[in-house]
Amino acid sequence: MDAMRHTLPRLQLTVPMPLKTGKVAMSPGEDGLIGIPFPEHSNELLSHLNDQRRAGLLCDLTLTSRGARYPTHRSVMAAVSLYFRRLFGAEEGGGEGGGGFSVCQLDCVAPDALDALLEFAYTATLTIPSSGMRDVLRGAQLLGIQCVADACRDILGETAEAEGETAEEQRAQNTATERISQGESRVMKGSRRKTDKKKVKKVGPHHINSSVLNPPPASPISHPSPASDSFRSLPSTQPPSPEQEDLHHKSGQNGDPRGIREPGRRATLNGGLLHWLHERPRIAHPPPVPPLNDKLSEDDDMEGFGDDGMLMGSTSMPTSVAERGAAVSAVGGGRKRKSQTPQQCPVCQKIIHGAGKLPRHMRTHTGEKPFQCSACGVRFTRNDKLKIHMRKHTGERPYPCPHCPARFLHSYDLKNHLSLHSGARPFECPLCHKAFAREDHLQRHRKGHSCLELRTRRPRRGPEHGEDGRGDGSGREQSNPLEALSLQAHSSAFLPHTVLDGGSGSGPPLMFPADVERERSFALQALAQLGPRRLAGYPELFLRGLELRGGREAEGEDPGGTHSPASQRDRWADDVEEEIGEEEAEEEE
DNA sequence: CTGGGGAGGGGGCCC
DNA sequence: AGGGCCCCCTCCCCA
């Protein structure tokens, strides 16, 4: 696979290679690297593996259950099952098992359930009679196949708690739930920018939460431990050795070469907090008891999968973003489910919302433009764009201005145009107070002059500290005390109420309320409670909040979009949270 | 530098 | 689930 990844782009640069899907994926702007998706590859690979399994070819592992024998492949089982991942990880790392485990007795998993789980592993489809649901659930729990367990629970209408978890399980799960509710949602929103960094920081010995510092006691059942797991249960103050890290990656990434290409990210995810929550199952074969916290363990590995991308094309663990979302919803307790099967682009890893939208998105990478204008020959990636284009030839301008003869091709153009009639200029530069009818014009304006300087990354510390936090010592943003002071007042006048009232966002809808001074006073009072450093340190956030309040009246539209007001507010809140966290960390130091 | 038009892309709704 | 249609946003280009 690595060879393919490294050679195919070179081929692609010279000879566009038609894929089976007729698409050539190009990922522009990344050092000339071109990502070529083979959407069918995963299915074909899995299908061939299943054929081999049925024919008994290349099978290096036999599972048995109450006399029934199931030849299978270690790699597949390790990919789909946390239990086997750890079991075989021991072989690689510590050599305990050597070439062992050629036969694994799993009498505790009902034969039918085991058969169903194997089918799932090789086909990504779980086919079971409803009467066998509980056995499959049990088997999935034992083997650490979390998505199946979740699905079974959903069907059975059970929760993990209802199944008699121990106190340790419950405690660990609560922590995991908290983590998921904090971190996972960012993945679902496609906002990974700063989450990883925050997680890394939390892994450090000074940022271990109590549940990590005091891990649940080990299972009283003692079984030979795979050596690879030993580092997982190390005290949190002992970071894994490089060898362990390496092994960790091996066992966690399930062969996804991206995990190798992005070691930092992988380390962030798999080296993150949750690993210390695991009380790894003391497993040999067969596992005599359900591994404690197995759910947590699998969740973590699931995250590794998910954030690694290739959700759509993942063969070894057919876990979709939607499934993850469902799992998050189930574990996190009622988080709003994203609409319509979000899928992740295998090229850019972007989450695409909406059924059937991924092929459309993929054409942005492939450059494929299957829709050609019959009049002028211009090609488009989308038929709706072609349809709009055709209006130029037909003269159709379906969006007439009610106030003037102007007609427009796009509804949005009409909307912009109407603001001219109304005189509304809702987009105002917070620095020079120049108003614009269009938001993009405001953005252009702000990029075009000194506004840009003030909205770039703010210094971490105020001028009174004599450092700007950027590390270059320039301190440009706050070099002029008057400017800084002006900025404070200027920005705080438009501070969104999300800061002042803890995020309710219930501020007045207008950017410039009539009583600006009152607004400013209110903001300053609130900011004073936050401390002078923060007061001086958030021009970007202020401006972003300004955009939110002034630039988007249509709150609620594009609810899941990356540009939606809600998501912008989320990002903004992320920044506030992160910045506060950074300052607090510095203060601790 | 600004106003306006258009293109490209994402998401929601519906079939 | 996939596709059509629409809306929205952002960016680019031109006058």
Image (cartoon, coloured by chain):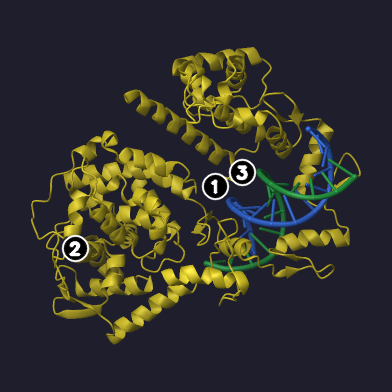
Chain colours: A yellow, B blue, C green
Instruction: Name the secondary structure under disc 1.
Output: loop
Which numbered disc covers residue A560? 1
Query: What chain is tagged by disc 2?
Result: A
Q: Nearer the viewer's eye, disc 3 or disc 2? A: 2
Of residue A486 and residue A380, the one placed in the foreground of this image is A486
Q: Which residue is labeled 2 in the image? A: A90
Q: Is residue A68 above or below residue A354?
A: below
Whether residue A89 is visible here, answered yes or no, is yes
Q: Earlier in the sequence, mark 2 or mark 1?
A: 2
Q: Do callouts 3 and 1 point to residues on the same chain?
A: yes
Q: Nearer the viewer's eye, disc 2 or disc 1? A: 2
Of residue A562 and residue A398, the one placed in the foreground of this image is A562
Q: Position of residue A556 (x, y in %)?
A: 59, 41
Q: Name the quadrant containing residue A183.
A: top left
Q: Label 2 sits on what residue type?
A: Ala
Image position of A83 (left or right of A183): left
Kindly identify the residue that appears in the image at 45 percent across and 66 percent down: A313
Which numbered disc covers residue A557? 3
Q: Position of residue C11 (x, y in %)?
A: 69, 47
Q: Label 1 sits on what residue type?
A: Gly
How far is mark 2 from mark 1, CA to CA? 42 Å
Kindly identify the residue that appears in the image at 35 percent across and 79 percent down: A49
Q: Is residue A276 above or below residue A539?
A: below
Query: What chain is tagged by disc 1?
Result: A
Kindly identify the residue that appears in the image at 62 percent across and 72 percent down: A14
